Structure formats: structure tokens, C-alpha cells
Image (spheres, coloured by chain):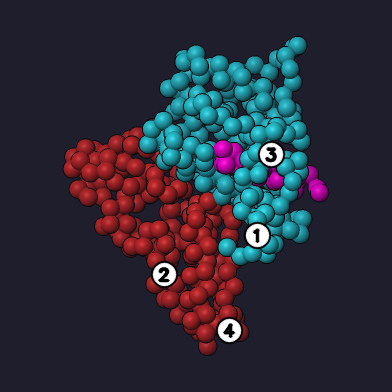
Amino acid sequence: MVTADQVWEALAEIPDPEIPVISLVDLGVVRNVDVEDGRVRVDFTPTFLGCPALEVMRDAIAERIRSLGAEPEINVRLDDSWSTDQITAEGREKLRASGFAPPAPREAAAPTLVQLQSNAHRCPYCGSTETRLENIFGPTPCRSLRYCATCRQPFEQFKTI
Amino acid sequence: MNAQVQQLLEIADDELILGWRDSEWTGIAPFLEEDVAFSSIAQNEIGHARALYELAARGLGTTADELAFDRSPDEYRCAPFVELRLPEWERTIARHYLYETADAIRLERLKQSDDPEIAGLVAKIDREEAYHRIHAQMWFDRLQNEPRFTAALEELWLLAQALVGDDFRLQFAERTGLSTESGSEPQTLERGVHTDELTELWEEMTMVRRSQPAGTRW
């Protein structure tokens, strides 16, 4: 009989479909695993509601659970219980190492343009804070585009959600 | 249909139809950053519509896809304001600014909903919308003294009022600095009325689904 720990281990091997350097467990989107009588119930949250990777993630989770010999039940939580603060320390380091600046901590108030334009954002390549906002939006909903004035490298910044 | 489900559908329809209009900038926006921005905003709005349809669908015993694609155009509850095809950049930005301002007002209210599912989903939507608001405000600040932009704001303001209920129109006017005094001016087009442009959009949006037998899996 499969255990919850085995399920967590298996899910930790599923890469994010759009940022494959990080796993779904690193991303923090797997919120809960319950095992009962050969059925595995997984709660997970989308990063952004319009994320096209949502179905891919859900199917990958179901597939992995079936390969453990259990029947999956995937519950997509449509609430505000996930934030980018739940990306694990290991996940943040994996992001940084592949050129994605990890998200700034979430604050109670919504982000402002002043914050996005501040130089509190560190370049994932050289570590400089001499970076500027190029575009609030990027190649996927979860990313912004920034530019590092020190090493002259454009880079992607994970948005704080 | 109870009032709560109706309200979810109104917002979902606004987001779906506006998301569709926003996506029309993909590939042809005035510059690359805005091409990326409007594509991303469109994706978010359609994602919000899907999540709101899912909540509404539970109350109606149907599915999100059926709500999004299987109704006839006159059954949609969106405001005519979001239906317009606006190929001029200044009108698109004027609509974006007015829409995000109105959307913030209704999301603030729904975050306080007694229904934890609605309050939870709206809190998540609002986190994403914060980036749309920053983008809209940035463009407002940039264009606020441009005659073509102010003319577009004046033109669209009348229609924009239908986005929020009567009780919130004064607040909407205060936030935008635009006037609610209608006098002898024409009235806004309220929800329930549709433009011919919705029918054209609907034909295109539902074309693939209508061409396939019901129950096709994608």
C-alpha cells in the first residue's frame, strides 16, 4: 500500500511544465496529500488562474499516482491559500541558478509600481541590485522582465503573488 | 438563478469577452512590450472567467465550458462596454483603465463575501489584477493630457458605468474623476443589451466548439 511520503517523493520528481528546473513540490503548489484505502487525494493550487500548465500539472500528478498503483483524486483549490512565499528555499535557489530571479516576499497590500521599479530586485546572474523593470508582463503570467545595468543581462523575475 | 450565481456570471462574462478583445492585440500591438502585456492580461482575464464559471457551474449543474461556449449571444450577461472591438490604441487603453477601476470596486466588495469559496477565489483574482491595475495606471499617467486619450475616456465613460451596479457608480466616478451627471445625455447601455459586435465575436470564439460533436475532449 502506498504511503503519503511515497506520494510526496513521487510528486517531487514532476517538473513545472513551463519552468522545468523546479518541481511541483518546490513550487509549493501541492498543498496536501491524503492516502486512504488505495485512493490518493491531492490538493493543489494553480500559480496563476490562467496558467495553461494547469491541466498538464493535474494530469502529470494523476499519472504519477497511478504509476504507484493507487487511484488519484485531484482537487484544484481555487483560493488564495498559495502565494509565491510558499516556494521552498531549495526551489528559490534552483530558480536563481537558472536565471529566474525568485519572487520578493508577499506583503499584505498589493504591489505598487514604485516597488516594482525599486532596485530591491537582485540580478540572478551577478547579484547586483542595479536592475530595472523592463516590463511588468513576460512570457508567462507569472513572470516580469528586468534588466541588470551591471552585467547588462536581461532576466526574468518571478512575480510576487 | 439566484443573485449570487448571476453576479458570478456577470463578472465571468465580462472577463471572458474582454480577455478575448485584449487577445486581439497579440502580434499587432504598437510595440513588443505591449504585445506581451496584453497577451498576458488576456490570458489572466480568461483564467479568471474559467474559475468564476466553475463556481457558477456548480450552482447551475453545468460545466464551465458549457457556460463559456454553449450559450447563445443574447444569454451572456457581460456589459456592452467589453464587447466593442477597439482597434485604436487610445480607446483600448481608455477601456483598460476604466475596466480595471470598476473591477477593483467589485472585487473589494466580493472579497468580503460570506461565501468562503467566493471570497477565497476573489482574493486570488485580486492578487493578479493588481498587476493589471499598475499597468493601466501607468498608461493613464502617460496619456492623461493627450487629447485623443481624453476624448476616448469621455466617449467610453458612459458605457463603462454599466460595469458596476447603481450603488457603486458614484464611487466609480470619484475614482476616475469623471462625471456621473447624465442630464439630457444618453444613458449607459446596461447588461442584458448587446451590440452586434458580440455576435461577431461569439461566432469566432465558439466556431471550433460548434464544429465538433458535444463531448469532444481536447
Asked whether residue B218 is drawn in magenta, I would say no
Which amino acid, by three-letter code, is at mark 4? Gly
C-alpha gap between disc 4 and disc 2 = 21 Å
Which amino acid, by three-letter code, is at mark 1? Gln
In percent of the image, x 66 and y 34: which residue is there? B197
**Residue marked by disc 4:** A38
> Of discs 1 and 4, which sits in the foreground?
1
Q: Earlier in the sequence, mark 1 or mark 3?
A: 3
Which amino acid, by three-letter code, is at mark 3? Thr
Magenta span: chief secondary structure = helix
Q: Secondary structure at mark 1?
A: loop
Q: Secondary structure at mark 4?
A: loop
**Residue marked by disc 3:** B199
**Residue marked by disc 2:** A14
**Residue marked by disc 1:** B212
- Kindly identify which chain the residue marked by label 3 belongs to: B
Give the chain letter for red.
A
In percent of the image, x 53 and y 62: which residue is there? A55
Depth check, front residue: B65 or B142: B65
Give the chain letter for cyan.
B
Which residues, given as a range, are shown in magenta?
A: B1-21
State the image coordinates of residue B146 (x, y, percent, origin top left).
46, 15
Whether residues under marks 1 and 4 lie with C-beta atoms below 8 angstroms apart, the answer is: no
For the residues beneath circles 4 and 2, the answer to whether they share a chain is yes
Asked whether residue B8 is drawn in magenta, I would say yes
| Crowd tier of the residue under label 3, counting other residues whose Cα lies within 10 Å: few below 14, some 14–19, many 20 or above | some
Q: Place residue A22 in its image quadrant.
A: bottom left
Check the image and name the residue furthest to the right.
B1
Check the image and name the residue furthest to the bottom.
A1
| Crowd tier of the residue under label 1, counting other residues whose Cα lies within 10 Å: few below 14, some 14–19, many 20 or above | few
Q: Is residue B86 visible?
A: yes
In the picture provided, is B132 more to the left or to the right than B66? left
